[in-house]
Amino acid sequence: MSARSALLLATLSLTACSAAEIPTPERAAPPAAVPAPATTTASAAAPATASASASAAAPAVVPRDPNVDKLQSAAQTDSRAYDMVRSLVDEVGPRLAGSLGDKAAVAWALRTLKDKGLENVRAEKVMVPHWERGQESGRLVAPYAHTLAITALGGSVGTPPKGLEGEIVMVESLDAMAAMDEAKVKGKIVFFSAPMTRTSDGSGYGKVAGIRHRGAVAAAKKGAIGVLLRSIGTDHDRLPHTGAMGYEKDVPKIPAAALAVPDAELLARLVGQGKPVRVSFSLGAKLLPDAESANVIGEVKGREKPDEIVLLGAHLDAWDLGQGAIDDGAGCAAVVEAARLVLGLGTRPRRTIRVVLFANEENGLRGAVAYAKDHAAELDKHQLALEIDLGSGRVHTTRFLVADASRPVAERIASLVSPLGIQYDKAPARGGADLIPLHAAAVPIVDLHQDATNYFDVHHTANDTLDKVTKEDLDQVVGAVATVAWAAAEAPETFARVPEELRKR
Ligand SMILES: [Zn+2]
């Protein structure tokens, strides 16, 4: 299998825009309030490695860098992150990859990064898929007529203009689909009914998102004419959740859509009664030729080792149904604002802090792939990378994917964010979807795990709007990002490359 195939496979299994398959951290509940910055002293310091003995423990106390206290204080009192999200969603609007809104978002990002004082601001061209949703509707036909709340999965083909009608065959999982007799599926519409579990770490998402990615292929292999799935979400609103899906060469491409959770539960109850259930749906979706987009980049140039990079990532594109405020306007604002606060210190870190607003995370990861390709020659100079892509949820835990030799510096950074109520967990970081190519290139990664309890109520829906962003929580994220960015860029130690055995997911 080629490296590119492995990457794409990893992309499919990881699923964009989530804390996909992040195992539950063994940790205490996050604190209710952010304590004031600690005033620790060198004399109280314990060996930094002491905290490694517990899976989740308060990190060792180490001398504090006054710049860290300044950053954490500024994040609480002077953060403009919320206003940045408002500017993005109000001035740009929906910004699905390849759309006019996507182009407007690139222009907004260039303007904003320059306004914030970032250096070397530029757009690096990326060709992205251009998929359009079009008009869509769904209807229960039997046992009675009723409107269904549905939306096409991203990348789905459209239906014939008059729509698609058929009897429902309900299955719970991809394994159940694979085991089904072809005769029971042929000519029907497969309905995947698996619910998503609400968890604080978002791990419920990864357990069912594979159905969204691979359900259409699994059903088409058995002769189905279409696919509906219960939305991958934790709400009970009549708002369906979109998200990327995929097709395979030589398997018929059948239309695929998500049902709002209450509509999916209705279908499940009706099927449970043992009577034939028929539905029809119409999708106007179509795939257009690839369009030009860009990764937008800005930097805080390092004073001593400017060619060494600490990367702060988020993604600029968003699904078309809502405003993309939590996914991922909040992440974009958090990383840009963190860089602005570092600039406000009046002193530069040893290394360069690079903000990357990735193109096309939601339905292709073309931005992430292009970044790794365009910057291949300097990936070994990337010291540490992080991505913020879980709304404005407070950070409760940090993890690092680093070589053993870099564990002490990782633990020192963890100790610096502990005053923000953030636990250190020595389990390996996994990185966000845009970091997959960097992960493959052995770049050290840090995860700032955010509270995802309510994130999947609105994720990928029309309800992803500015009012779902909580300013105080977003500012805590900014403080965490700024601290990690500064501390990693200022650290005297060079981060070792991550050995392959540690990178296996
Ligand atoms: Zn996202």
Image (cartoon, rainbow, N blue to C red):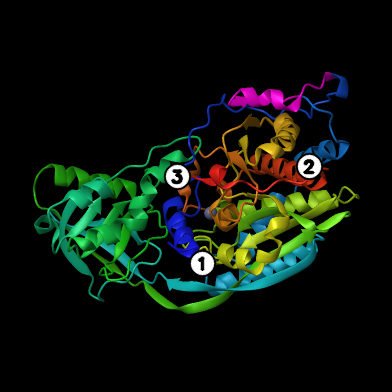
458 left or right, relative to 334:
left
Report, in whole angstroms, how far the alpha carbon at label 1 lies from the one at label 3: 20 Å
Q: Secondary structure at mark 3?
A: helix
Residue that protrudes farthest toward the bottom in the picture = 289
Residue 235 in view in this figure: no
Residue 487, numbered circle: 2
Residue 308, numbered circle: none
User: Magenta stretch?
Assistant: 44-60
Residue that badge 1 annotates: 96
Q: Secondary structure at mark 1?
A: loop
In this rendering, the answer to whether 207 lies above or below 359 is above
Residue that badge 3 annotates: 457
Mark 2 vs mark 1: in front: 2
Q: Look at 84% across and 29% down and name the residue there.
A: 63
The three-letter amino acid code for the residue at tag 2 is Ala
453 left or right, relative to 474:
left
Residue 28 % position (x, y): 57, 24
Q: Quadrant of residue 139?
A: bottom left
Mark 1 vs mark 3: in front: 1
Report, in whole angstroms, how far the alpha carbon at label 2 lies from the one at label 1: 34 Å
Q: Look at 56% across and 54% down and name the residue there.
A: 440
- Asked if the stretch drawn in magenta spans residue 437, the answer is no
Q: Look at 75% across and 62% down and name the residue there.
A: 298
The three-letter amino acid code for the residue at tag 3 is Asp
